[in-house]
Each structure stands twice: as structure tokens, then as C-alpha cells.
Amino acid sequence: MAESGDCIDGNGIGGLLGEIFAAEPTTAQRICQSCGAQHPTGAHRAYTGAGVVLRCPSCGDLAVRVAQRAGTRVVEFRGTWIFDQA
Amino acid sequence: MTWRVGTVVEVRPEAARSRMIVLDVPDWPGHLAGQHVDLRLTADDGYQAQRSYSIASAPEDQSLALTVERIDDGEVSLYLCDELRPGDPLELRGPIGGYFTWQVADGGPLLLVAGGSGVVPLAAMLRHRAAHNSGIDTRVLLSVGTWDDVLYRDEFARFEGDGVAVHYTLTRATPGGWSGWSRRVDAEMLRSVGPEPGTRPQVFVCGPTLLVERVADLLVGLGHEPGLVKTERFGPTGG
């Protein structure tokens, strides 16, 4: 990525990212990276323990993994996500 | 989402093992029927415990009300049912979950199926429906252990007619003279409750995980559209 003439800093899209992270999460649609099925987040299967794992209701593959540490959340998102614009 | 501090207005018994907790929450943003809140309790030594509870009140109601089932070995529900008093502060955040919600504007027909205290978010939907004098065809099937465990019994009886039909199946014990169902929810029962899958009802199923999965599978087997069957699992344990 040597050519940087037509990009901006991630900081510059803070407004867009803030809009996405503030969207209603349970009605967001997710397309599974593994089986291609599309389901709302609210229809996925959540397994809670030391952390939280969210799985595709069709194939069981990983959708979200959340680890909690003091004062932080460490999050892995997988698949394609579709958020409604507020 | 920020934590707020509400004040307990009232705690009253609801059926044999539950309590209705009415809260005054400053700046409550309002909710949709079917949503829940997270409650957080903090002990003197800083230990915190957090649980989710469905909102029982309709969006139109004056106060926010939760119904909490007393779980004998549950640390949070024991405190809420046995210790909480009017005037006590209670920390909560919400409303949470736009997925498992219904509004009159979403239309019907409606099929609501619950196991045990899974009826709570469905009660909010029925109260919301009543607040709007809606005549939407609404079928309700509640699987409960005993007649004494049935939540909101008198209120639901008043909802009957006007397009609402409420059915019970008692899975542990039945009172004398009981002529209703006394078995786990099965396909025959769901077929009898209706409405016909061909009318494309919006279906909400809430309760313990095993019941929810079985009922959702049965409904899809009967021809209901999977995308119209929304589920809310309580998990294997409460607390």
C-alpha cells in the first residue's frame, strides 16, 4: 500500500464508524463467511462463559467472539454485516 | 449504553413463585414490547452480578415493570424477590434487543408461545395490543408447570375474546376438574391453537432453551416460515 494519495486516516471516518457501532445490533443481518446463510444477529446462538461466543444458526461457525478484560472488550467479528441506517 | 439508577416503586407477588417489580427510571427512553433490560447488583465488597430480565409493562404504561421468577439457588433472583423494597435503588441498562419485538403497526396474525416465565415479554405485547384496542388475531399458548405458577392469569382472562385466545398446557400437575392439555407442547397442540401457517403469522417463542428449540422446529415442520418465527432463549439456567 505504498500509494496513499487517495486515502485518508481512519480517524477521518470516525463519524461513519460511530454510526455503525451505535446501530441496533440485534436486527443487523449477518452473512456467514462459512455457509453463506443470512440471519439477524438476534437469531444467532450465543454461548456465554468466561467470554461470549456467537454462532451462525445454520452452520454453527463463529460470528463474534468477545473476551472481557479489566476495562476492555476484545472483539473478533466474522462474516459480512448489514446495519440499518438510523 | 449507559447504566441508569432506577428506584423501586413497588414489589408485589405474582403467581406462586414470582414478583412484579415496578420501577421509576429517570429519563427512561421508552421501549418496545418484547425488549429486556440488564440489571446489575453490586455487593458491599464490590462483587457484581448481572442478569437480563424481560420488560413486562407495555410501552404505554406509566412505569417500567419487570417480573422476576424466584430461582431457589439463584443469587440475583433471591435478592430481587426476597430483599428488594420500595425506595431501593436498582441499577439497569436498556431497553435492549430490537429483534424480538412486536408493535401493533407490524400487524398480524400473531402467535405467542411461552414456557414458564417466558411469558413475560409476550405479556408486554398483549398489553401493548390492548392499549391500542387492536383486534389483531392473536393466539397464545403457555406451557406452565402447575396452575398456581401461571403468571397474569386474571389479566389474560380479561384479554380473551376480542381476537385473543389463550391456551394453557400444565406439564407437572393439574387441578381437579382440569379439562385442558397436560403434556409438553407438540405439533397437534400447535395445529389446534393456530393460526394457519398459510396466513403468515408472526410468531414469538420464549422460554427455556430446550422448549424454544423444540417449538421452533415443530412450527417450521408445520409450515411456518422460519424467518417469521422469532425466538428468545432463557438458557439452561436462570438465576
Image: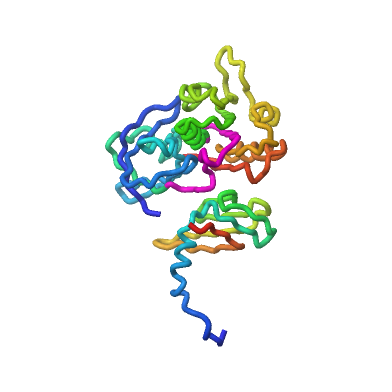
Q: Identify which residue is drawn at 64% across, 57% down.
A: A61
Q: Identify which residue is drawn at 42% across, 35% down.
A: B57
Residue B104 is covered by the magenta coloring: yes
Q: Is residue B118 above or below residue A25?
A: above
Residue B202 is covered by the magenta coloring: no
What is the image's colouring?
rainbow
Question: Residue B51: which quarter of the image?
Answer: top left
Q: Is residue A62 above or below residue B221?
A: below
- Which residue occupies the foreground of this view, B101 or B209? B101
Residue placed furthest toward the top? B177
- Which residue occupies the foreground of this view, B130 or A55? B130
In the rendered picture of this protein, how many numbered marks are placed on residues? 0
Query: In this picture, which residue range is highlighted in magenta?
Result: B95-118
Q: Is residue B207 above or below residue B14?
A: below
Is residue B149 visible in this depiction of the protein? no
Where is residue B129? Give x, y as percent.
49, 33
Tell me the quarter of the image containing the N terminus of chain B: bottom left
Q: Is residue B53 above or below residue B161?
A: below
Where is residue A75? Give x, y as percent.
51, 63
- Which residue occupies the foreground of this view, B149 or B42? B149
Q: Identify which residue is drawn at 52% across, 55% down.
A: A52
Question: Residue B112: which quarter of the image?
Answer: top right
Where is residue B114? Give x, y as percent.
56, 33
